[in-house]
């Protein structure tokens, strides 16, 4: 069985200016070093707004931190007359390791389709970064008990024509929309059910090796106090964390789930 290093990624959303970003990353680095966090047990990444990336890069490089960072979105275009957009090349040049694509807030407020999410993931891969591809059902779908079917459809559409090698290297985040920012956490068994189904679908479409290697995260009201139960599930390889990632101690606690 392939060994998958857990990933704890903190999505700051539209919070924190570049000075606040530096303070938070410094505090997080201090918390993790004080508690002797083992980065081999959980990789740690922060996902700040675009405007904070340069400051985070300077801090991470200058202090040789093991914390990685990434962006919350990316353009489907390489360059040109696309006012307000940021290309994958620009993000790679800033040292980003990850790009979140298809977050439910982008799907909901910007009507992003699976095809667009795939195009963004493709640009991310081409630029040498790792996409964190977000999928997950809303409350109505969950009530109807169609969470697996719905989420797997998003997986198929968002991963599109990626090769088995590309799929093996990427990160999929299962985020039930009803659990994002609501304090409503899916139970560890709920998370396991869909994360396992995602891995099985990857294995079926892209091969066993891809299924064993792809990292599947859970996201939705994760905190230091509930992460251990979620991480105990065999198909959950980490978490995409929103609100709790804005507090160094809280996010540090999530990273040190073991
Ligand atoms: C998210 O934004 O991806 C998320 C999971 O948010 P929260 O942890 O606040 O629910």
Image (cartoon, rainbow, N blue to C red):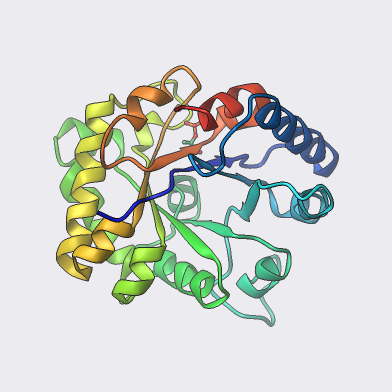
For the image shown, how many numbered marks are present on the structure? 0
Res 160 quadrant in image: bottom left
Please state if 199 lies on the left or on the right of 119 as rendered. Answer: left
- Which sits in the foreground, 52 or 109? 52
Q: Is residue 85 visible?
A: no
* Residue beneath the point at 62% across and 54% down: 70
**Can residue 83 be seen?**
yes
Where is residue 6 drawn, in percent x and y? 43, 43
> Position of 136 compared to 182: left or right?
left
Q: Work out whether residue 93 or residue 165 is closer to the camera in this orientation and state it.
A: 165
Q: Quadrant of residue 251?
A: top right
At 70% from the left edge and 65% from the top edge, which residue is drawn? 84
Give the image location of residue 121, x and y in percent: 46, 67
Residue at 55% across, 67% down: 129
Most foreground residue, 45 or 191:
45
Return the residue found at the far top: 225
Q: Could you tell me residue 126's position as x and y percent?
A: 52, 78
Q: Residue at x 14, y 64 (%)?
A: 204
Quarter containing the C terminus: top left
Residue 236 in the image: above or below residue 186: below
Residue 25 occupies which quadrant of the picture?
A: top right
């Amino acid at each position: 069985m392939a060994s998958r290093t857990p990933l704890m990624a903190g999505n700051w959303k539209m919070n924190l200016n570049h000075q606040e970003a530096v303070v938070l990353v410094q505090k997080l680095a201090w918390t993790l070093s004080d508690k002797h966090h083992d980065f081999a047990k959980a990789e740690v990444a922060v996902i700040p707004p675009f405007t904070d990336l340069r400051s985070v890069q300077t801090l991470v490089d200058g202090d040789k931190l093991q914390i990685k960072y990434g962006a919350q979105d990316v353009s489907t275009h390489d360059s040109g007359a696309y006012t307000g957009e940021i290309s994958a090349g620009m993000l790679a040049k800033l040292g980003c390791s990850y790009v979140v694509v298809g977050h439910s807030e982008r799907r909901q407020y910007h009507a992003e389709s699976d095809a667009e999410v795939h195009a963004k993931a493709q640009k991310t891969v081409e630029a040498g970064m790792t996409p964190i591809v977000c999928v997950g059902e809303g409350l109505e779908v969950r009530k109807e008990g169609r969470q697996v079917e719905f989420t797997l459809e998003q997986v198929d559409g968002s991963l599109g024509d990626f090769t088995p090698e590309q799929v093996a290297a990427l990160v999929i985040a299962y985020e039930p929309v009803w659990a994002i920012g609501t304090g409503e956490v899916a139970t560890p068994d709920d998370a396991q059910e869909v994360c396992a189904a995602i891995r099985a679908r990857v294995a079926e479409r892209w091969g066993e090796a891809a299924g064993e290697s792809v990292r599947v995260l859970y996201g939705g009201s994760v905190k230091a106090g509930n992460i251990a139960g979620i991480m105990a599930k065999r198909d959950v390889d980490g978490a995409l964390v929103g609100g709790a990632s804005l507090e160094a101690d809280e996010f540090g606690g999530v990273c040190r789930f073991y």
